[in-house]
Image: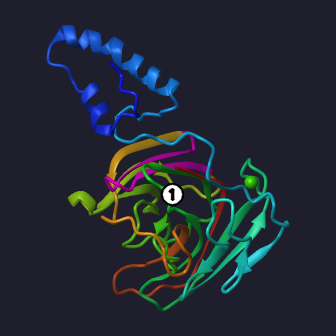
Amino acid sequence: MIPMNPPSPIQVRMWISKPHNPALASRTCVLVPLLFALLASHGWAVDKAGAAATPSGAPQAEEDFESYPADATFTTKQILGSDGKGWASAWKTGGSSSLPKGTIADSPSMGSGRYLSGTVTTQSARDVSSGAITRAFLASKIAGPFTISFRFRPDTVPDNVSYLIGDTKAASAFGPDSTSSWKIAAINGTWQCFDGAANRGPNNYIDSEIPVTAGTVYDMTVTVDPGSHKWKATISGGGKTFTQEEINSRSSTFDLDTEGVTDARWITFAVQEVVAVGTPTVGTTGNFSVDSISIRY
Ligand SMILES: [Ca+2]
């Protein structure tokens, strides 16, 4: 008997847990697909691992950059766009030891019209130099797992530069930080997902083994469960796809910004130059492109 209310992840996990005898295994093989079909028919998208329901309705916030003037730019202390339609702020830059800049572009094509081209020029003679382009999205109505998907292209891959993508409680000049629930990084030549310390997680990176190649367009989808402090990542590009579930968040809380904006979290795209511990930065430029952002909850 299927309950009338949406099932909890624990219920789903129990229903699809491994049976102990062959007869039950046979029946389960038939019943599990039927269960997922029935749930889908009721509008409940259920992750096959049972870990998190993935929102599949219309996005609460979207950004395709088509409404901005071609060649529009913004840099330190400037903004692009405004709040509204699920967003809690305009686009802005952050970086105390760098020069970040955003430009609306459509060439070279990402296959999706106009996009945001981000450039961060780092400073020399520092331990770390980083900058970010970021925007706040309304998060007060997030009551369960939410999904962020976007398109990202590293246009240059300079030595000692990492691209860091994630969410933060407040606007960050450095990209993902100790408040982040998810973080994807281009480090040492591959895309990596940060398996954080929430839930006593390992606090290190999971390597997707998908190479970070200048000029390649990557589609990324992240589903975060703020309740369990776990997230799931799918990264596709260069003919490869990587999916990892049950990644631990970095932060064991999911707090909303109450200072810069109200009831919001920030999505951030950052560039960071680190040469080596004790070796000063030389100053370089990271250039990336972003488009097709959707947030569903
Ligand atoms: Ca676009």
Residue beneath label 1, please? Answer: 141
**SS assignment for the magenta stretch, majority:** strand
Residue 74 vs residue 136, the one in the foreground: 136
For mark 1, does the 10 Å Cα neighbourhood hold few (<14), some (14 to 19), or many (20 or more) residues? Answer: few
Note whether residue 36 is visible.
yes
Q: Which residues are magenta?
A: 217-239
| Ligand 1 image position (quadrant) | bottom right
Magenta stretch encompasses residue 236: yes
Residue 265 percent location from the top left of the image: 50, 67
Taking the image as shown, residue 43 lies to the left or right of residue 246, namely right
User: Dividing the picture into quarters, in which one does residue 7 lie?
Assistant: top left
User: Residue at the bottom extreme?
Assistant: 125
User: Residue at the right extreme?
Assistant: 69
Please say if 16 is above or below 171.
above
Name the residue: 62% across, 57% down.
153
Note whether residue 16 is visible.
no
- Amino acid under disc 1: Lys
User: Dividing the picture into quarters, in which one does residue 291 lie?
Assistant: bottom right
Residue 158 vs residue 2, the one in the foreground: 2
